[in-house]
Amino acid sequence: MEKRGIPSVVICTDEFLSLGKSIAEFLGMPTLKIVSIPHPLGGLEKEDVLKRAEVAHEEIAAALTAAKSAAKAR
């Protein structure tokens, strides 16, 4: 989606942040926005996942807004 001009954000746990950045660079997208959340997600109760989403949502929105603004400036 990002390569098609649709602002995108990858969300991954902090355990995989380095891997996510490496893959983005390998795919030719070194500036791809990646938001990190605490690891692990597996086995968490719904309420705990929602708490993590609450913490991350502002960073995600900011990354998407910045990407959209940059696209308009082009």
Image (cartoon, rainbow, N blue to C red):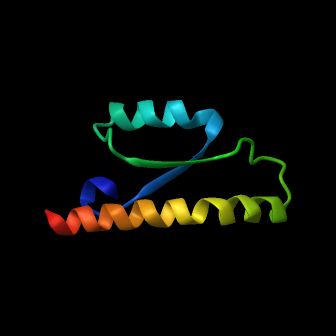
Determine whether 41 is above or below 46 in the image: above
Residue 55: where, in percent of width, then height?
66, 61
Q: Is residue 56 left or right of residue 50?
A: left
Picture residue at 75% right of the left edge, 63% below the top:
51
Quadrant location of residue 25?
top left
Q: Nearer the viewer, residue 36 or 20?
A: 36
Location of residue 5 (image quadrant): bottom left
User: Which quadrant of the figure has residue 39?
Assistant: top right
Rendering coords of residue 28 (x, y %)? 28, 37
Which residue is rendered at x = 27% and y = 67% of the image?
A: 69
Q: Residue at x 86, y 58 (%)?
A: 45
Percent of width and height locating residue 49: 75, 59
In the displayed structure image, the side of residue 9 where residue 52 appears, left or right: right
- Residue 24, given in percent of the width and then of the height, sits at 39, 38
Total of numbered circles in the picture? 0
In what quadrant of the picture does the C terminus appear?
bottom left
Residue at 34 percent across and 58 percent down: it is: 1
Task: Name the side, left or right, on which 37 lies relative to 20.
Answer: right
Along the line of sight, which residue is nearer the eye, 15 or 54?
A: 54
